[in-house]
Image (tube, rainbow, N blue to C red):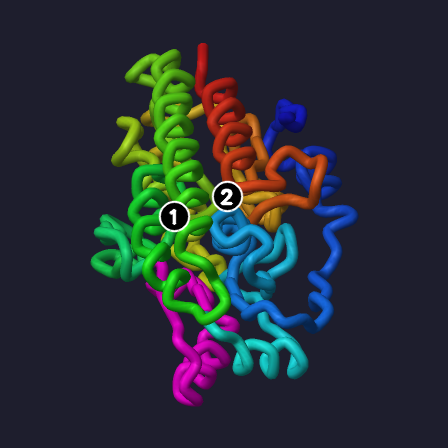
Amino acid sequence: MTRPRRRARVGVAAVLLVALSALAGCAAPTAHPADDRPLVVATTTILGDVVGELVGDQAEVLTLMPPGADPHSFEISAVEAARLRSASLVVSNGLGLEEGLQHHVDAAAEEGVHVVEAGGLIEPIDYSDGDSRGEPDPHFWTDPTRMIDVVDGLEPELAAVEGIDPGPLATAVDRYRAELVDLDGQLDTVFSAIPDERRALVTNHHVFGYLAERYGFRVIGAVIPGGTTLAAPSASDLRELVDAIRGAGVSTIFADASQPDRIVQVLAEEAGVDVDVVALYTESLSAPGRGAATYLEMMRSNAQLIATGLSP
């Protein structure tokens, strides 16, 4: 399921809301009722979905962030922090992604809760430009092969949780690993239809470094020149981005669905830029029925939108 694209002359207010409707109905997560199963807490919706695929009904999986949340700024309640500290295992993204709740994860670890950072299970790449140049990029899930590494690394961690049977877990891991291999092949096929000269990505912040490396894209730039949405672009940053967009002939910019208006608002300050703005779920899953309710669905939907946006 994909969302419609809109042609946007930057500066026209009506186009700012390409994807705001996609956020409607995103409800906050509710705590699962207490039961005898071990509690596994995942910080992000993406990791919550993957962990749920692996453990099935063997554990209670609590995902801290709701659909559509910005993982850089999201914070949790005192009740959720208490549940975090009572978990049998916490699976976080790491690499600096969860800026708003990292102190809660650290506090749980200090109290003896076992925390696994998915970012520590992969070979990370560093940001190549912008304010975060040289720092590790936490957006590894845009490359399904990195997610295979995450799944392989999570298997022994989950198997060590009391109450999780390693046998069914191994079966689920094998099944999901095969789905990730298939996803990688599907994305390669979809992206192969995009001519090399049009494989240029511009986003609201740097989120597609791993995807670009895996599938042969060029990252032209980002409105927020760094890996976090908490930063702000300068006037010179915007001028450089506009020059890069014009030089590369970029006709489509991709904005995360949690902040679809910011990219247009900042570019509206620069004259003569005529682009499509396409909203993607890049850092969070969507609510059910909105095209990105699971990690696999999100990646397939984004691939189709990217291919459509960049094709002649």
Badge 1 element: helix
Answer yes or no: is residue 265 visible. Answer: no
Q: Residue at x 51, y 31 (%)?
A: 302
Q: Quadrant of the N terminus?
A: top right
Question: Mark 1 — residue?
Answer: 170
Mark 1: give few (<14), some (14-19) or many (20+) Cα within 10 Å.
some
Q: Residue at x 47, y 62 (%)?
A: 164
295 left or right, relative to 145? right
Establish if 69 lies above or below 101: above
* Residue 27 in magenta stretch: no
Badge 2 element: loop
Question: Mark 2 — residue?
Answer: 282
In this view, the residue in front, 213 or 152, is 152
Establish if 8 lies above or below 190: below
| Residue 62 placement (x, y as % from top left) | 60, 64
Disc on the earlier residue, 2 or 1: 1
Callout 2–callout 1 Cβ contact below 8 Å: no
Q: Which residues are magenta?
A: 90-118
| Residue 168 placement (x, y as % from top left) | 46, 49
Answer yes or no: is residue 43 visible. Answer: yes
Q: Quadrant of the C terminus?
A: top left
Q: Residue at x 36, y 45 (%)?
A: 147
